[in-house]
Image: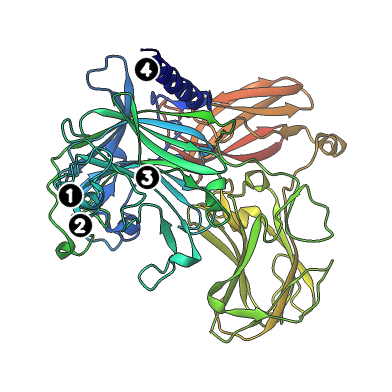
Amino acid sequence: MKSNLLVLVLIMVGVLSAQAQVGALIWEDDFTNLDNWIVLTGNGSWGWGNGELEYYSEDNVEIADVPDEPGNTALLLTARQESGPGIVDQWGNPLSYTSGKVISKSMVSIQYGMVEARVRVPDIDLGGWPAFWLLGTANYAWPSKGEIDMMELGGRQEFRDLHDTHNGGNGLDNSTVNQCVGGNAIFYSDDAVTPENPTGAASISWDPDDEYCRPYYSYDPSLVERFLVYRLYWDENELRLVVVDDGVEYDLYADPFPIDAESDEFRSPFYMIANLAIGGAFTDAYNLGDPGSGDPVSMPFPAEMYIDYVRVYEWNGQGEVHVGPPAFESGVFGLFTDETPVTGELVPEVSSHIYVWEGTLVDGTIPPYEGDNVLSWQTAGLGWFGAGIMAVQPLNLFDFGDGHLKFRIKIPAHVDFQIGIIDTWGNQQYVNFPGNQTTYGLVRDGEWGQAEIPASDIRGTLIDLRMLSYPFVVLEVNGVGCEFALDDIYWDDGGTGVDDDIASGRKLQLFPNAPNPFVSSTEISFSLASPLAYDVVIYDVAGRRVAGVRGDGAAGLNTVQWDGRNDAGSAVGSGVYYYRVEAGGETIERKMVLMK
């Protein structure tokens, strides 16, 4: 008896020691609303890169009551067998299924901690692919940004059979998609580059010798139509993926995955994704555009996936959650400059990379305009050229909307070129610099000159200045060969201080609204030099009036609230809006972002 008690005490000490590594709750979403999420639509590129068969629709995402749990709500993603206008793939071909997908990109990002999600998936036999996962926020292409799949059901029979002598499996090669769940982590590795895998994606679930991967099997009851808890234990040294069934943790790998220099994608922030896919390369169902590549979908419809909550705890003293877009930059932000005073900057090969696209440029010989560094290139004779400065993490230049992108360039006077920017959503916008013409202050004499592009011109109507991937791009498409150089590239926010406004005799000063972006309401503040009547008008990107208010303002600070509703009292949709304040014959305008 004493021996048994000793063993029990030792076991309990071990359990308490493990639990002690889990620290305080630092963030949670109990899904009473969708404030932390963006609803995706469409079929992506070749079914989101996986040959998926569904069209993601806003109509398939909602907050709903949890079955048999009165008073509890959850995120509900519904898959349906339906077709109709607009339910098409990227080429316009009709699709037969719709479903739901949400992401927390630009809303919530996580770096380390114990991430926990309580999830209930539907009967997915055959073709369903429910998943809760994370992608790196970095602007690198997949897989270099990293991917962490906390849970995936719907994997191939071959995969299930390979591992079913472990973790609840019976070794009989008879498990169904409803009885097996796994997780994964994907990163870039030079060793993984092969003709069959040109992306270099290294997957820790790739385990043909059945030594490491341990998906969890539950035959009766199966894993569907009931809640299970999925956990990611994550610090700077390792990842551990588990599923909790009836209070018992089951590791999805024989050992935690060690993070090293090769897999250091996992030392950066990630955002979350939840979706209920249909068909595609992960499943035994067929791929988009190729019915002969797999079996027909037999999943019962409608199919409902519930995510009850997501929580993040400290783990091993680590864990950070950032809510909202990246930190707002202001003042003068340097992209590539040595001597211009800046308030913030990108550092080449540390926080930024300079890329030449498709080998269109080679090194040139033009010396710097200032300092010791220069971007000097010669064309490679491919009929066009392109290059850009990519920020490693999304760059928030929202407060530069009234400012300028400035740069120095030395290029033959007759060469036409374009300067542009790209955001993390893939939107691009360019302005033209025709040969032998003075444009944005750039005198085309073949010598060093400076251009100043107003942010209002280069951002267009779609660019999200809160989430830039390339804050500077140069393009040429006419095939003219030349040598050129760029230097002293930076953004200025175009702002003036309060003292400047007073000195210039201005009657009106308009401050940035706060919060911005906002979900439910925001405060618009402005200062008047003396009591004046004011007019605040809010309008959309098309210039249409949305809402407005008039009043008599006092000298000093004045504020008005906007709750995201139009003049008729109806809620307006997410997007970019402008607010304009008029007082004393002066007008000032700023931009804000409503996110729901």
When asked about the image quadrant of residue 326, the answer is: top right
Which callout, 4 or 2, points at the residue further toward the start of the chain? 4
Question: In 3D space, how far apart are the residues under numbered discs 3 and 2 (Cα atoms)?
Answer: 18 Å
Under tag 2, what secondary structure? loop
Question: In 3D space, how far apart are the residues under numbered discs 4 and 1 (Cα atoms)?
Answer: 63 Å
Q: Tell me the amino acid under the disc marked 4.
A: Asn
Question: In 3D space, how far apart are the residues under numbered discs 1 and 2 (Cα atoms)?
Answer: 7 Å
Q: For mark 3, what is the residue?
A: 40
Measured as percent of width and height from the top left, residue 55 is found at: 27, 49
The residue under the point 41% across, 21% down is 7
Q: For mark 4, what is the residue?
A: 4
Q: Is residue 192 left or right of residue 536?
A: left
In this rendering, the answer to whether 1 lies above or below 360 is: above
Which callout, 1 or 2, points at the residue further toward the start of the chain? 1
Q: For mark 1, what is the residue?
A: 83
Quarter of the picture holding the C terminus: top left
Q: Tell me the amino acid under the disc marked 3.
A: Leu
Q: Tell me the amino acid under the disc marked 2.
A: Pro
Q: Look at discs 4 and 3 and give the one toward the viewer.
A: 4
Which callout, 3 or 2, points at the residue further toward the start of the chain? 3
Quarter of the picture holding the N terminus: top left
Give the camera-side residue of 475 and 292: 292
Q: Is residue 480 left or right of residue 173?
A: right
Question: In 3D space, how far apart are the residues under numbered discs 4 and 3 (Cα atoms)?
Answer: 55 Å
Q: Are marks 1 and 2 in contact (CB under 8 Å)?
A: yes
Give the camera-side residue of 33 and 169: 169
Which callout, 1 or 3, points at the residue further toward the start of the chain? 3
Measured as percent of width and height from the top left, residue 96 is found at: 17, 51
